[in-house]
Amino acid sequence: MRNAEFVKWCASPKSKRQPWIKVRWINVTSISWDIIKALSFKHEMHPLALEDVLHIRPHNVSKADYFLHHLFLRVLVHEVADESSPTFVAEAEGLDPSALTSKQALHQRKIEQARLDALKQGTLRVSVTPMFVFLFCDGTRFLVLLISESLLTIVGYARSLLLHKTLRPT
């Protein structure tokens, strides 16, 4: 469904959840203002949660916020990065001659650098992507994620886990 179709659907009576439906799951696979705006008006999403979605900061941690109409989760999804993807390994800078006072210190520095290089050979590259989940009391769930092929499995697992917790009798 394209953005314009989804916005029309949100505004129409067809989007009202039927009483017999226990859970409604909506995947949003890109952050688009028209989609987020339509969902926020329809479901009274809290402005602070929307701010977290719209202003992605990669250094943030996972968190959960309880608001009046929904629970908001920001989860960092870690996945093994492709070998061809760029690395973020810090480059070794040149040695500062004033920092070295002897030949022995220079030798020690070279040994340490060799150890670091050996450790980097076994480095596992991991990419981190934020995933946003809105859980409403009426059984509506939104998942906002910039999706890739490898994340489809994670989404399926998260959905089945949340459905199991929602439908399980207490």
Image: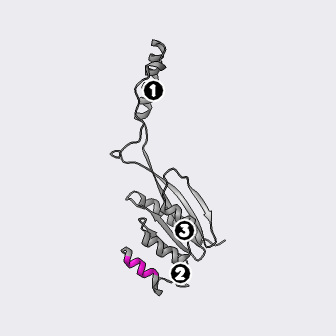
Q: What residue lies at 42% left-to-right and 23% top-to-bottom?
A: 95
In the image: residue 143, left or right of residue 81 = right
In-image side of 140 versus 80 (left or right): right
Q: Secondary structure at mark 3?
A: strand
When the figure is inspected, residue 35 is found, relative to residue 53, above or below; the finding is below
Residue at the extreme front: 98
Q: Is residue 33 magenta?
A: no
Q: CA distance from mark 1 to mark 3?
A: 46 Å
Q: Which residues are magenta?
A: 4-10
Task: Give the spatial CA distance, label 2 vs label 1.
Answer: 59 Å
Q: Quarter of the image holding residue 163?
A: bottom right
* Real-space CA distance between mark 3 and mark 2, rounded to the nearest whole angstrom: 18 Å
The mark that comes first in sequence, 3 or 2, is: 2
Q: Residue furthest right?
A: 170
Q: Give the residue pinned by disc 1.
A: 115
Q: Work out whether mark 2 precedes mark 1 in sequence or the reverse, and give the earlier one.
A: 2
Amino acid, disc 3: Phe
Q: Residue at x 56, y 75 (%)?
A: 44
Q: Is residue 88 above or below residue 54?
A: above
The numbered mark, 1 or 3, whose residue comes first in the sequence reads 1
- The residue that label 2 is drawn on is 21
The answer to which image quadrant residue 166 occupies is bottom right
Q: Give the residue type at disc 1.
A: Arg
Magenta residues: mostly which secondary structure?
Answer: helix
- Within the magenta stretch, is there residue 5? yes
Which residue matches tag 3? 134
- Helix, strand, or loop for circle 1? helix
